Image: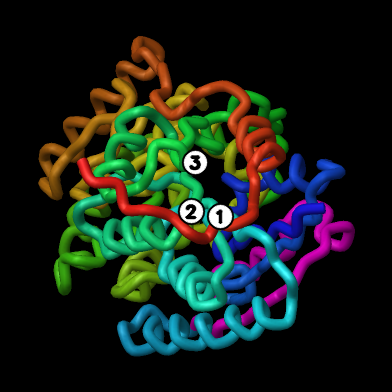
Amino acid sequence: MKKIAIVTSTRADYSILKNLISHLRENKKMNLKLIISGTHLNKKYGYTIKEIDNLNAINHKKIDINIKTSSEENISKSFSLGVKKFSSYLKKNKTDLVILLGDRYEILAFAISCLISRIPIAHIHGGEITQSVIDDSIRHSITKMSQIHFVANKIYKKRVAQLGEEDSRIFIVGGLGAYNLSIEKFQSKKKILKKIGLPYLKKYILICFHPETLNKNSNLKNFKKILNALKSFKDQFFLFTMPNSDQESDYIYQEIKKFISNSPNSKLIKSLGNKYYSFLKHSELIIGNSSSGVLEAPSAKVPSLNIGNRQTGRVMANSVLNCDFNEKNIKKKISYLLKMKKKFSYKNPYYNGKTPLKIVKILENLNFNNLINKKFRDI
């Protein structure tokens, strides 16, 4: 039986991974261990471990890397603590393969631990570009440490190959998030809004904004421009989600709280948990720079306003509009999206059928012997 570990470090990656986790648990050829770390174990971010489905029935391990603030110093300390604790775990627990998703610094720490421990990695969502965040470099670094690559489409396969990876190790499987939405049983709008104390709300807009981590000292200024633009839409309710634990996210968090204190038509929810897809589905649109607006919103038939450069470089559906940090342009494009919602094509370039089943099938047929050794493929 193949011993596989899968790592989740945030509410966002768990919502993407949850169906893959379920299929791996049910597979009789796999022995799955779920590693839970990062902001899942932090009360500031909603202690989202409690939102993991059937946790008591899953073979899991909690590894706290002490995420406190979004300062560069604290992130570096959490990263180094992660490498230490993850390496210790791998030394004590036989693992044939580790599955990692995306581009978080916590995930990079686990990748480094695997590299040192000589344990192969299967990486999901490699080959993508996000130009204004450190995640871009982290993602490509994880690609080079990984032996198997599950990419969303042929453009990303080509880019992983450009990084020297062999074609036989790259598999186009589509995006897990897009698949999840295709099978999601959405809760009613009334039911989800009742759970957050807004049972009579008619319509709302989701605001999901995270720092552009390469643009030092500009995030707060840019975010204020978004908030100023929102003030023009008196007939809309704004539902904010918590920013990621990245550099300068604490400033954004404080600004959200300030905005809400002066605006009765707004609310911050630290984590929408397993109800996030339903909140997305029933929203008028999603505003900000979250990958969810690019990877998942089209499958929910919800338009997105992607502001700034955090997602620049990703393939995008026609229902995703890009905008700079210009208050006038933001207002104009919000109005346009609200007007055109029912007229967009919502074909999602990240949907490619039963993604988790494809991943499981590949893993079933994969020979793990000597998987750790790979060649650099010159182009």
Question: Residue beneath label 3, please?
Answer: 150
**In front of the other: label 1 or label 3?**
1
Question: Residue beneath label 1, please?
Answer: 371
Q: Is residue 235 above or below residue 13?
A: above
Q: Which image quadrant: the C terminus? A: top left
376 displayed left or right of 205: left
The amino acid type found where label 1 is placed reads: Leu
Residue 224 drawn at (x, y percent): 22, 60
The amino acid type found where label 3 is placed reads: Phe
Q: CA distance from mark 3 to mark 2?
A: 10 Å
22 displayed left or right of 46: right
Q: Earlier in the sequence, mark 1 or mark 3?
A: 3
Between 25 and 231, the residue placed more toward the observer is 25
Res. 231 in view: no
Q: Residue at x 75, y 40 (%)?
A: 23
Q: Earlier in the sequence, mark 2 or mark 1?
A: 2
Between 328 and 305, the residue placed more toward the observer is 305
Residue 282 drawn at (x, y percent): 55, 30
Magenta stretch: includes residue 48: yes
Between 379 and 89, the residue placed more toward the observer is 379
From which residue to which does the magenta span run? Answer: 44-67
Are the residues tagged 2 and 1 within 8 Å (C-beta)? yes
Q: Residue at x 34, y 42 (%)?
A: 287
Question: Residue beneath label 2, please?
Answer: 147
Res. 130 in view: yes
Characterize the local packing of mark 3: few (<14), some (14-19) or many (20 or more) Cα atoms within 10 angstroms.
many
**Secondary structure of the residue carrying numbered label 3:** strand
Q: Residue at x 52, y 76 (%)?
A: 113
The amino acid type found where label 2 is placed reads: Gln
